[in-house]
Image (cartoon, grey):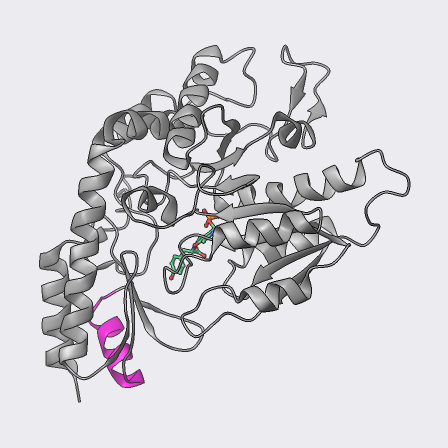
Amino acid sequence: MQRVAPEPQDFDRVLSSMCTEPHPAAREAAVRFLATNPGDPGTYQEIAALEERAVEGLGDIAGLSEPEGYVASGGTEANIQAVRAARNLARDAGGVPTKTDAPTVVAPESVHFSFQKAADVLDVELRTVPVDDDYRADLGAVEAAVDDDTVLVVGVAGTTEYGRVDPIPELAAIAHDHGALLHVDAAWGGFCLPFTDHAWNFAHAAVDTMTIDPHKMGQAVVPAGGLLARDRSTLDALAVDTPYLESTSQATLTGTRSGAGVASAAAALDELWPDGYREQFETSMADAEWLADALEDRGFDVVDPELPLVAARLPDDLFSNLRDAGWRVSRTASGELRVVCMPHVTRETLQAFVADVDALRA
Ligand code: 0PR
């Protein structure tokens, strides 16, 4: 029987996603390495070498000259692994008594829900604390929540809902004062922030680990997340022995994993860092500001965009009408429309969207 192959997502009207059309070089690399497994580097040596290149590239972006890390399945895995490393390092510190038998992770409430999964899987307590009026981690609240049981403090550099950047150097100071590690979740923001004045990376602050995902703003194919660590000991805290492989240990959470994602991350970084990413950031940021102005001109409350992500309060029926008209838009937990200006979202797309906002207003 002849079947029609289903069409994948057409990106034309997708305003809600943190993923995007991959760069052509990333797509091509993914296809070439589709059948490789970087989880077995002794066998698949070419992809293992590409993974080292990808990690070097991520290190360049994140201000880390000798980066440790790997290409994960996504931000969720990288975040889980950061929590796991912090927990294991505290547990195995060798001191008697160990730091804690009831480890906690302290994070602003803007943190991605992957940390809830981490807490559940790893049996640590996730303490989320309020953000300030501009949706950034409130330092006083973080300080109050951190104690001797805290193994990790999390700061977000580019929050999922509002694209905000937490005060990373101050969070690092609080974490280290209490013997905890500092993790930065730059899953989405990491490929934009080098072109801003924010202090967000390893060169700006005593960051211990970072999530930075090629499959979001990095324009690689899914799955390609990134976990970076300043010290080798962090990766060692994740490693298990692998007796029947040529390599002797494995620090990843998954076993067999996608060579396509790894190769595409290396290819995208080769192709786009830094000029391509800079141009994309400048274009997307200008588009976000254009959209914010257009919505404000129409009388809607807009959260001023700091990275290419616009949140604005639209009436519920208008939101539904826009969805019915085929726009893939989403809302924040408190109900604002959320538009992520990814590379596939062009000025023309946004103009068509605003024209529909005008047409579909009650
Ligand atoms: N950290 C941050 C800051 C994130 O924004 C995300 C994903 C993750 C980690 C997890 O990454 P992975 O999905 O690669 O594991 N952010 C959004 C998500 O939860 C992206 C999003 C949100 C897309 C809302 C669409 C949407 O409507 O998937």
Q: Residue shown at 20%/44% (left/top)?
A: 280
**In-front residue for pair 305/351:** 305
- Provide residue 52's location: percent of width, then percent of height: 45, 20
Per the picture, the main secondary structure of the magenta-coloured stretch is helix
Q: Is residue 174 left or right of residue 54?
A: right
Q: Look at the image and tell me whether residue 261 can be seen.
A: no
In this image, 259 relative to 313: left or right?
right
Q: Quadrant of the C terminus?
A: bottom left
Where is 132 relative to 190, above or below?
A: below
- Give whichever of 168, 185 is nearer the camera: 168
Horizontally, residue 270 falls left or right of residue 99, namely: left
Q: Residue at x 33, y 46 (%)?
A: 193
Relative height, residue 136 to residue 154 (above, below): below
With 187 as the anchor, is 177 left or right in this view?
Answer: right
Name which quarter of the figure residue 203 lies in: top left
Rendered-image quadrant of the N terminus: top left
Residue 115 x %, y %: 59, 55
Residue appearing at x 70%, y 32% in the figure: 237
Q: Is residue 325 visible?
A: yes
The part of the image, by quadrant, that contains residue 54 is: top left
Position in image of residue 200 (x %, y %): 43, 47
Q: Quadrant of residue 31?
A: top left
Residue lying at the far right of the rendered structure: 96
Instruction: Find out whether residue 325 is within the magenta segment.
Output: yes
Q: Which residues are magenta?
A: 315-327
State yes or no: residue 198 in magenta: no
In the rendered image, residue 202, in percent from the top left (x then y), is placed at 47, 38
Q: Quadrant of ligand 1?
A: bottom left
Looking at the image, is 120 positioned above or below residue 252? below
